[in-house]
Image (cartoon, coloured by chain):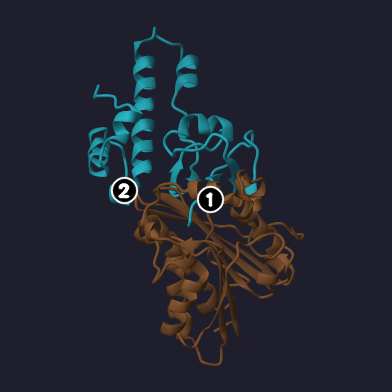
Chain colours: A brown, B cyan
Amino acid sequence: MPHDRLDIVIVGIGGVGSTLAPLISRHCEHLPSQVPVRITIVDGDAYEEKNATRQAFARCGNKATATVEMLCVQFPRITFQAVEEYLTPENVSFLIGEGAIVFCCVDNNPSRKVMDDFIGTLTDAVLISGGNDLTDGNVQMYIRRDGRDVTRSLSSVHPETARPEGKAPYEMSCEELAMASSPQLFLANAFVAILMFLCLYHLVEMEGALDNPRLGELYFDLQTGRVEPVDRTNKLKEDS
Amino acid sequence: MSKIYSQAELRGMTRLRLRDVCKELRIPCSNFNNQTYDELTSLILQAQSERESSAIAQTQEPQSNAQRLAAAPQPKAGMVRVISGASAAVFPIAGCTIRSALADLHQTLNIDPNAQPYVNGQTASLDHVLQEGEQLEMAKKSGDKAL
């Protein structure tokens, strides 16, 4: 196994994150015992009954804390930490450290940009970002290694992340937050989670995956049943 | 001359029906089963286009030898792989600019007209002339929701 420790941060524990967190936890629970694993779950939102159609939770209340309570019972080998806040430009440096593998499971581009920009300041880190529309979506992996981009950043590929529209949840009023929802399929959320887990599997189980990743971006379409991998290797000779 | 199928009609067909249409049109292919939906559609449109051109040429007044040579079918353009999100197929568009290729393909692959083009992973302009064997990606917007 190419890692001597795993520092995993899951930002957003809704439809995608609540499916992803148990998958990651189950895999990490059975890694070699000499590899310490810490999973930090970040979300300022709370579970409500109406979330039950797409999100897995044991009780109402803050999503991060409720999820950690559930997972630490099932997976005692892992050190879990709950952060009951939305990720912001002010707290991102406290939540994400060198060597972290960050799963971006949020529903807005301003937050994605905050994480994308911050990962670009680190020497070694990985950002795995996923999202879906009703029946399609994508997962992109941004790898930093020895201070250079091994794969391209989110913003360098997607202008909607580089110049985000709309507000992040920490910028919204309670009324805006209550109204900020749109139709989603649980299957689409689950598909994103599986593809994000696939990226982690590659990083954790395949030698050299950080330097020569086989995965860059994965697009999927539930209507056609297609998954298309796209190479996102950084081909620029200088740091970007 | 056999029936001409519009792109809309082809889009409404199953892959099995597209394969049968290819056989009706006597489109040469070593193994239709390995062709994707979009590849089959492209083959049919290409074959129909060539037949129409040939039929028009036959109805015109007798040509001189020079005119006949000039009107002779050109060698097929080289293939370029085009990706948009989860949709991908190869098309005979080498020699075309990205702009002109998209005019025909944007509906087939549901391409966002504002998508950023990449050729072999590098940012490209719409005036880039595609070469055989290149891969053109029209980067689809990221999925927005996750919570």
Q: Position of residue A98 (x, y in %)?
A: 69, 74
Q: Amino acid at mark 2?
A: Ser
Looking at the rendered image, the quarter that the N terminus of chain A falls into is bottom right
Which residue is drawn at the image coordinates 38% and 9% (left, top)? B60
Residue at image mark 1: A177
Compared to B60, does A13 lie above or below?
A: below
Q: Amino acid at mark 1?
A: Leu
Identify which residue, A69 or A187, lies in the foreground: A69
Q: Say whether mark 2 and mark 1 are on the same chain.
A: no
Between marks 1 and 2 in the image, the one whose residue lies nearer the viewer: 1
Q: Position of residue B83 (x, y in %)?
A: 49, 46
Identify which residue, A50 or A136, lies in the foreground: A50
Regarding residue B133, the answer to whether it shows in the image is no
Regarding residue A108, the answer to whether it shows in the image is yes
Which residue is drawn at the image coordinates 47% and 67% (left, top)? A61
Q: Outermost residue toward the top? A: B61
Q: Position of residue A193 (x, y in %)?
A: 44, 64
The CA distance from mark 1 to mark 2 is 56 Å
Which residue is drawn at the image coordinates 58% and 39% (left, top)? B130
**In the image, is B61 to the left or to the right of A88?**
left
Chain letter belonging to callout 1 = A
Quadrant of the image occupied by residue B6: top left
Looking at the rendered image, the quarter that the C terminus of chain A falls into is bottom right
Residue at image mark 2: B30
Q: Position of residue A91 (x, y in %)?
A: 69, 65
Quadrant of the image occupied by residue A84: bottom right
Chain letter belonging to callout 2 = B
Secondary structure, mark 1, is helix
Secondary structure, mark 2, is loop
Compared to B36, does B60 lie above or below?
A: above
Q: How many marks?
A: 2
**In the image, is A78 to the left or to the right of B43?**
right
